[in-house]
C-alpha cells in the first residue's frame, strides 16, 4: 500500500489517482490541504526519495509566485524551507506518492510505473 497525497481539485492529481485505480494499486488517500505534511514528514520523504528539496515545491502554484519564493529560496536554509512547506499544502508539489522505498513528486507515468514495478506503455 502506498500513500497518495493529493489536492482533489488538481487535474494532475485526478489523472494520477485514476491511473493508480486502473493499475490496481492500493493506496491511502490524503488531502494535502486538510492534512498538510509536517516538516518532519517532508524531511523523511526527501531522504527516502533522494530528491532535491526544490522538487517538493509547487513552483507553478499561485502561492509560490505570490510569496516570490523563486528569489527567496536560495537564501533560505533547508530547515526554513521545510518549515515553510509545512505551513501550507498549496506550496507542496503534488501529487506525492510515498512507497516503502521511494517518494515521487508530481505525476510522470513512466516514473511511477517503474517505481511500482508495472509495465509502461507510452
Image (tube, rainbow, N blue to C red):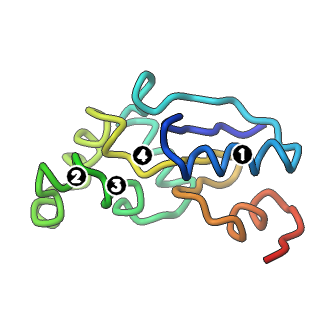
Label 4 and label 1: CA atoms lie apart by: 15 Å
How many numbered marks are there? 4
Q: Nearer the viewer, mark 4 or mark 2?
A: 2
Decide: marks 2, 1 in contact (CB < 8 A)?
no
Observer-side mark, 3 or 1, equals 3
**Residue 57 falls in which quadrant of the image?**
bottom left
- Residue placed under numbered mark 1 in the picture: 100
Are the residues tagged 2 and 3 within 8 Å (C-beta)? yes
Where does label 3 land, which residue?
57
Q: In this rendering, would 100 be left or right of 4?
A: right
Crowd band around label 1 with a 10 angstrom C-alpha radius: few (<14), some (14–19), many (20+): few
Can you tell which mark lies on residue 70? none
> Which of the marked residues, 4 or 3, is nearer the chain's N terminus?
4
Q: Is residue 11 left or right of residue 122?
A: left
Residue of label 2: 64
Left or right of 63: which side holds 18? right
Q: Is residue 30 left or right of residue 102?
A: left
Query: Quadrant location of the C terminus?
Result: bottom right
Disc 3, SS: loop
The x and y percentages for residue 18 are 73, 45
Mark identifier at residue 43: 4
Amino acid at each position: 500500500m502506498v500513500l497518495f497525497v493529493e489536492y482533489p481539485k488538481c487535474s494532475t492529481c485526478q489523472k494520477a489517482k485514476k491511473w493508480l485505480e486502473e493499475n490496481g494499486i492500493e493506496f491511502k488517500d490524503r488531502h494535502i490541504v486538510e492534512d498538510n505534511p509536517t516538516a518532519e514528514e517532508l524531511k523523511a520523504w526527501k531522504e527516502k526519495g533522494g530528491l532535491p528539496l526544490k522538487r517538493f515545491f509547487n513552483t507553478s502554484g499561485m502561492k509560490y509566485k505570490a510569496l516570490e519564493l523563486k528569489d527567496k529560496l536560495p537564501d533560505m536554509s533547508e530547515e526554513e524551507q521545510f518549515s515553510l512547506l509545512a505551513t501550507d499544502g498549496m506550496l507542496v508539489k503534488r501529487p506525492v506518492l510515498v512507497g516503502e522505498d521511494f517518494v515521487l513528486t508530481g505525476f510522470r507515468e513512466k516514473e511511477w510505473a517503474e517505481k511500482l514495478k508495472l509495465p509502461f506503455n507510452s
